[in-house]
Amino acid sequence: MDLQPSFSFELFPPRTPEGVAKLPAALTQLASLGPNYFSITHGAGGSDQDGTYDTLVTVVEHTGVEVAPHLTCVGSTRVNVARSLHRYQQAGVKRIVALRGDLPRSSANSSAPGDFHYANELVSFIRETCGDAFKIEVAAYPETHPEASCPGADFENFRRKVDAGADGALTQLFYNADAYFDFIERCERAGINIPIVPGIMPITSYERTLRFCTSCGADLPRWVRLRLEQLQNDKPALLDFGLNVVTRLCEALLRNGAPGLHFYTINRAEPTLRLWESLALAVPA
Ligand code: FAD
């Protein structure tokens, strides 16, 4: 296994002309930190398939850093997924983040429309059709996926993705290092030894942090929530507090063996740069 920590930065396809115009400057700053790769999100049902591809091209052109497109399968067909995989192979992509994607709001239960129901089926499909052409990352949920019936069932479903051929996992955001270490212990007991890289969301706003945590079922510790609430009208103080909380989280993770960090950048360089500096991580000469 690679002993150097892996650092990756997640981007999303910009949705406005302003977002498109700002991306190159953010990319240049983020690339200066020497990440292992940039990953690029993908709307469920292929809604922004071209957006993912176009962003991928922009990243390669501006940085030359490896790119890993996310590929969601919910609402998609085998033919469409095969087409995307072919396009990525042609573009020289070597790593895919394979996901189910969020179900359309109209789906009353977890039975997804299309040829795929769960991410493990997508991982199997990629291996069947492309062999080892791609390194496959999947999602992991230290605090349990919000739709899962229980943590045990969710863990078994995570194992299905590993058994189907995942090479590594990136976690959902969390602010509670113990949840991550508990998940790693469960993996060790189950004989799962792929790298599971924590997903890190910098804290830059009270409302946004609350919204992200609520939408993905992440626990925001009470003391953090109360402090952010109190500081919401004092932006510099809130940024400093958020930076301290996330720095301590990252330090604890790296000190105790996390194989790297995956930063949710939301297409902004500043929060990740501040965190990088605060963690005193290396910057390539
Ligand atoms: P799965 O692993 O399929 O799990 C989904 C749910 O189904 C879980 O509750 C699981 O327990 C259950 N389940 C899984 N397999 C089975 C089975 N065989 N039988 C019964 N139940 C099962 N979303 C996007 O739309 N675009 C993105 O680009 C994107 N990027 C992400 C990146 C990361 C690092 C993470 C952590 C999440 C990302 N998401 C993205 C969100 C993700 O799509 C949602 O969390 C989605 O609801 C689940 O996707 P999954 O791949 O984890 O699904």
Image (cartoon, rainbow, N blue to C red):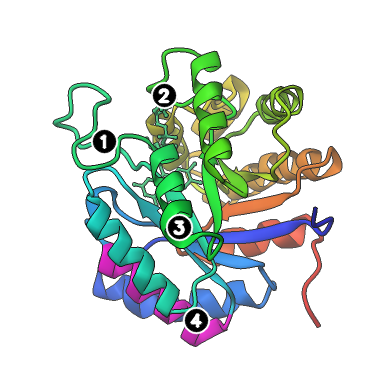
View quadrant of ligand 1? top left
Marks 1 and 4, Cα distance to the nearest angstrom? Answer: 30 Å
Residue of label 3:
266
Q: Nearer the viewer, mark 3 or mark 1?
A: 1
Residue pictured at 66% horizontal, 25% vertical: 179
Residue pictured at 84% horizontal, 55% vertical: 3
- SS class of the residue under badge 2? loop
Dot 1 or dot 4: first in sequence order is: 4
- SS class of the residue under badge 4? helix
* Mark 1 lies within 8 Å of ligand 1 (Cβ measured): yes
Residue type at tag 1:
Leu
* Mark 2 lies within 8 Å of ligand 1 (Cβ measured): yes
Residue 146, which numbered label? 2
- SS class of the residue under badge 1? loop
Image quadrant in which the C terminus is located = bottom right
Please tell me how crowded label 2 is: few (under 14), some (14-19), or many (20+) other residues with Cα within 10 Å: some
Can residue 173 be seen by looking at this rendering? no
